[in-house]
Amino acid sequence: MSSNSIQKRGTSTSPDEVFCPPFPTEEALDAYLSSIAAPRELVCPITQELMKDPVVAEDGHTYERSSLITWFNMGRTRSPVTNSFLTSTTDALLPNLAVGSMANVHREKLAKELIAICEGVRKRQQQRLKQQKGSVGYDISGVSVRIEGLLDAGADPNDRVEGGNTPLHLLIQASEIHLADHLLNHDANVTVINDAGMDCIATAEQALLLQQENSRINNPTLEEWNDFIQELKRRESVEKARIEARDRARTQANEQHRERQRTLAANARSDGAGGGSTQGGLGRLEDGWGYFPSLAALQFQASIPGPSPSLAAYENKEKERMNRILKSIGLIILVFFLFT
């Protein structure tokens, strides 16, 4: 089912029109799931899921980085695909940028369809509220199986639409907290703030307040709302702790990188002061004639080994002689112009 057809159903003027109806047969359901499944080359052979950080191993196959590292950490030294021995493990992993780009395109395509469904659910609920019909008789089984199928296929649960709302925001605004559970089970972020300045917890509290003001709506129940909000708060604390840990790790990695750069710079200065070769380092730019050093010196001098001591002494002596000649010529020209 395309996202366009879903959007047309979601914006129907009649709230009683069937939105994302249940699949009539198992064959129809299998056909839908096949239509949204990721191509085989974008699926990790270990997890059988759409890859987020694909890497190429020594056997030439592409895997999800975290799953392959876990594979090696379990003491396994054979290829998960070919069963051949791997002489190197995590040190030889290279990012597969082409597969990563294609996987992101497919993930974004699924996310658009997911958002279209969630927007349709919210608009349908708003239409029913205007006509004071509540949510009685609303069969969400067709919506539920589509949302779960899209998430299992790799849809991003944290994509945003106009207004900064995520799929989780949209389902909470529609009071469909049972559908929102699918998103929470696939690590949807609850700390995301939309353009109105509301995170998912504030959105849930506002939706509960609106439901209490409308006596015709009694689903979900107050107890279900309270349990849902408590779960959001629990996940919020977990997310904040994870974000803090990630920031600490990033800060530590940046500090280690800066320390390595300072050490390399100090070593380069030490080698330059000692007059030794700087091959493999930053190089030592020699004095050039004129206003700018030569392009060749800038590009290649770092990779050229320094001259022998005797040759270096001869070069310095010749440079000094040429400098004296040039200064003498310059002085003669200056005197000529002054007295003519």
Image (spheres, grey):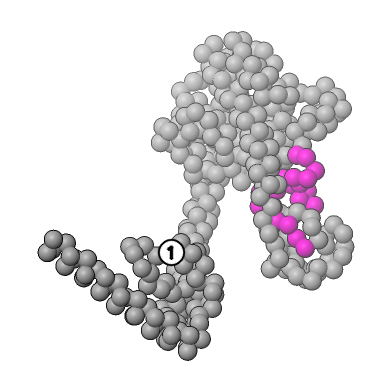
Q: How many marks?
A: 1
Residue closest to the eye, 155 or 309: 309
Residue 8 sits inside the magenta stretch:
no
Q: Main secondary structure of the magenta part?
A: loop
Circle 1 residues within 10 Å: few <14, some 14–19, many ≥20: some
Dot 1 amino acid type:
Ser
User: Which residue appears farthest toward the left when viewing the image?
Assistant: 339
Mark 1 secondary-structure assignment: loop
Residue closest to the eye, 44 or 319: 319
Residue at x 83% of width, y 31% of height: 30
Residue at x 40% of width, y 65% of height: 293
| Visible residue check, residue 162 | yes
Q: What span is colored magenta in the figure?
A: 38-58
Q: Quadrant of residue 102?
A: top right
| Visible residue check, residue 137 | no
Residue at x 52% of width, y 51% of height: 239
User: Image check: 275 left or right of 47?
Assistant: left
User: Image check: 107 left or right of 331?
Assistant: right
User: Which residue appears farthest toward the bottom when viewing the image?
Assistant: 310
User: Image check: 321 left or right of 206?
Assistant: left
Vertical relation: 179 (above or below) 3: below
**Residue position marked by numbered label 1 in the rendering:** 294
Vertical relation: 337 (above or below) 193: below
In percent of width and height, residue 60 lies at 79, 57
